Amino acid sequence: MILTDSGGDGWGGATFQISTDSTLRFSGTLATGSYAVEYFCLEDGEHTVVVSGGSSTTIDEACFEFDDIAGDSFRGCGAIEDAFHTSSGEIYGAPSPAPTISSVPTPLPSPSPSPAPSPLPSPL
């Protein structure tokens, strides 16, 4: 995991957490500077990354990136909670949650047409 800070002064109290099945696996921060690399192994499956904490002025400088063996990456900046999948050394964005049921669609258009537009603008 590559940690970067555009301000060059560390994440200012912000931290990352990597969880699998709601179990915290790894956590850390970029204490100082603008760049660091954290090494860890994740088994195949779905994981969650959370970056939080710090101040409202420093959290937007906090960025992370995962790179996989195929050269693909998964990245984010600022306060974030996101899911991702790992499989055979590769990383993928996780699918969005299952769709929800929306309200009933609006009725069909009315059977009679609306009045024709006026040639001049309407008075205010």
Image: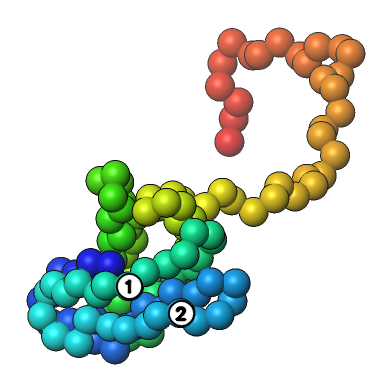
Q: Quadrant of the C terminus?
A: top right
- 13 and 31: which one is in front? 31
**Pointer 1 with pointer 2, Cβ within 8 A:** yes
Which residue is depicted at the point 45% across and 56% down?
A: 86
Whether residue 5 is visible, yes or no, is no
Q: Is residue 94 visible?
A: yes
The N terminus sits in image quarter:
bottom left
Residue at mark 2: 25
At which x and y percent is residue 92? 44, 49
Q: Could you tell me residue 114's position as x and y percent?
A: 78, 16
Looking at the picture, tell me which residue is in the foreground, 106 or 15.
Answer: 15
Q: Amino acid at mark 1?
A: Phe
- Earlier residue among tags 1 and 2: 2
Residue for point 42% across, 67% down: 42
Considering depth in this image, is 31 or 109 the residue closer to the camera? 31
Residue at 30 percent of width and 76 percent of height: 59
Q: How many marks?
A: 2
Q: Position of residue 45 (x, y in %)?
A: 53, 59
Residue at point 29%, 89% (across, down): 13
Q: Is residue 32 above or below residue 18?
A: below
Compared to 34, does 32 lie above or below? below
Find residue 40 and name its label: 1
Callout 2 amino acid: Arg
Q: Secondary structure at mark 1?
A: loop
Q: Which secondary structure lies at badge 2? A: strand
Nearest the eye: 17 or 99: 17
Distance Cα–Cα, label 1 vs label 2: 10 Å
Please tell me how crowded label 1 is: few (under 14), some (14-19), or many (20+) other residues with Cα within 10 Å: few
Relative to residue 29, is residue 91 drawn left or right? right
- 62 to the left or right of 85: left
Give the percent coordinates (x, y) of residue 71.
25, 46
The answer to whether residue 91 is above or below residue 36 is above
